[in-house]
Image (cartoon, rainbow, N blue to C red):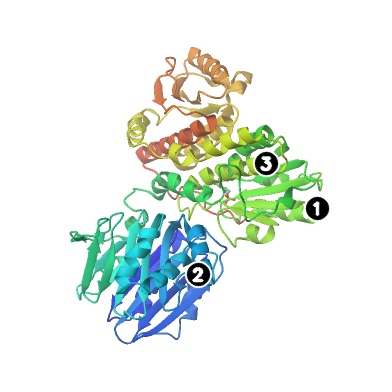
Amino acid sequence: MCGIVGYIGNKESKNILLDGLKELEYRGYDSAGIAILENDNFTSFKALGKLKNLDAKMAEFTTSSFSVGIGHTRWATHGKPTELNAHPHLGESSYVVHNGIIENYQELKKELQDGGVTFLSQTDTEVIVHLFEKNLAHTANAFEAFERTLERLEGAYAILLVHKDENDTILFAKNGSPMIVATDNDGDIYFASSDAPLIGKASNVIYLDDGQYGYVKAQEIHIYDTQGAEVHPAFSTLPTSKLSAQKEGYRFFMEKEIYEQSDVLLDTLLGRLSDEEIMFDEVDTSLLHGIDEIKLCACGTSYHAALTASYLFEREAKIRCSVEIASEFRYKKPLLSTNTLFIVISQSGETADTLETLKMAKEAGLKTLVVCNVDNSSMVRLADAALLTRAGIEKGVASTKAFATQVTLLWMLALYTAQTRRSIDQQALRKQLRILRKVPLASKVDGAMHERIHRLSKRYLHGHGFFFIGRDVFFPLALEGALKLKEISYLHAEGYPSGEMKHGPIALADPELFTIALMPEHLLYDKMKSNVEELSARDSTICAISPLEFDKADDFLKTRQHEHYMLEFFEMMVIVQLLSMEITVRLGHDVDMPRNLAKSVTVE
Ligand code: M6R
């Protein structure tokens, strides 16, 4: 979730690069940096935090002739957000910026270190520049050295590299991470990891394909394919609206974020999962010493993630686990014990009620941990330890990818607790780790299913309310489905444990009551089925979501067959998100900015 820009030409390059990074800042803002090569002189600046810090550092700097520049805004995956870990990374005489993950970086780093190379950062990216410089010693020119470097890299990347001895050239490569090369009317050349930085500057663009790489010089673009043959892709015309460019072709940020879930979940898992164990560099096992209870505390969607996790902590880690709504907890004068690990969950890390409970727990002497999406947020700074969900910036007020990553991270934390307390046998742990790896795939949007939900949505625009029902972890998912629907469509919706319907709510059942039933194959299917049959017998309109055919429903959304209920959970999560969005679109409401709500609730 980083952003990349590049420029080669006669215009003042600092402002071009800074403007470009501003457009990408929503993708990551824990640090940023720029390197510019002008008349054989490299100048580089890096700053922690928002882009304005980099802007301030560069205030006195300007270019006055032909120059070559690269820039980056970072969302940390490997290594903490520090200036040393910020891009561009320097070798002896080259700078590199990179978006993506070099999966074999540890092996490459060791090889380079054994050969005497000193690393300054903890990032995977730094291996690229050192490997390039090592290859340079044995090749005729920078391009050949770059080709050799790419042959060794495994993983996803978009790379820009500049080298002092070829001061009119940018080397580039794309594999799995976006990269665009563009030109303006003067023939100057630009790079960016999405359209937005280029709008208003360049006019013609080439969207590079995976495996393509090459170099640009003043007014020249050379692109090669995976076989090393030069190719000449056609230029396209840039879109004109910046906002739509940031949405990358999706109608709403919420839609883009639903589709992004599968990718960001890969980041959540990255480097934290081996075949045998969960690894959290950020947490010391001593955090769990002397702990016999876990208390999870949050608001809204994050509360639903906590509730989901409470089942997993008790079931997998065999540790007592309670869940609190932060706005209630802070005033109930709770009895707190120092044997409890207090975990707050927050996308923003700034929610006032949740932050306050964290302060209370700290004052009471409890060990604290935050599961958060925003590094350097108030909660991350305050808690004893932090685990970042790595969802990237979430713009839609209705939280989607933040929830997916929270649930995944908390599930991993439950397994980490289980392995630390030795409350899970190795075979069971191995199985869970294998299933965790399948979460990104289970969360991938199926286009045909989206289309079906779109068509179905027209039948659910009226009525006197929705009940989302489920059991076990599907109960918090039902709560989350109902919250999604009500916050953007303004229709009344409730989430309920399906076994509770007969204790009152079933009195509401009639054809104008819409029931969205979450019916996984691998968790209490028969119990769930009889609850839905009870509602069907009272003529409630039922939309069943299940991999198993069910003939008592009015509408049926058939999910894929999975081997574990948590994989069914993630597929159904996508479905309830899309259903809420499609109903809202038909009703004509603002999907991304619903009335009366704000993205971050920093007041009580
Ligand atoms: O940033 P947080 O996770 O602490 O925010 C908590 C809630 O305000 C948030 O989840 C809210 O419920 C979302 N708008 C739901 O989509």
Q: Is mark 3 within 8 Å of ligand 1?
A: no
Is 356 located above or below residue 96 in the figure?
A: above
Residue located at (34% from left, 69% from top): 145
Q: Residues within 10 Å of mark 1 (few under 14, many from 20)?
A: few
In the foreground, 396 or 182: 182
Q: Which residue is mark 3?
A: 419
Q: Residue furthest top?
A: 537
Q: Which residue is mark 2?
A: 115
What's the amino acid at mark 2? Answer: Gly
Left-right relation of 329 to 169: right
Q: Residues within 10 Å of mark 2 (few under 14, many from 20)?
A: few
- Marks 2, 3: nearer the viewer: 2
Q: Which residue is mark 1?
A: 364
Residue located at (33% from left, 78% from top): 68
Q: Residues within 10 Å of mark 3 (few under 14, many from 20)?
A: some
**Quarter of the picture holding the N terminus:** bottom left
Give the number of callouts.
Answer: 3
Disc 2 to disc 3, C-alpha distance: 37 Å
Q: Could you say whether the residue bearing mark 1 is in a helix, strand or loop?
A: loop
Percent from the top left, x then y, of residue 309? 62, 38
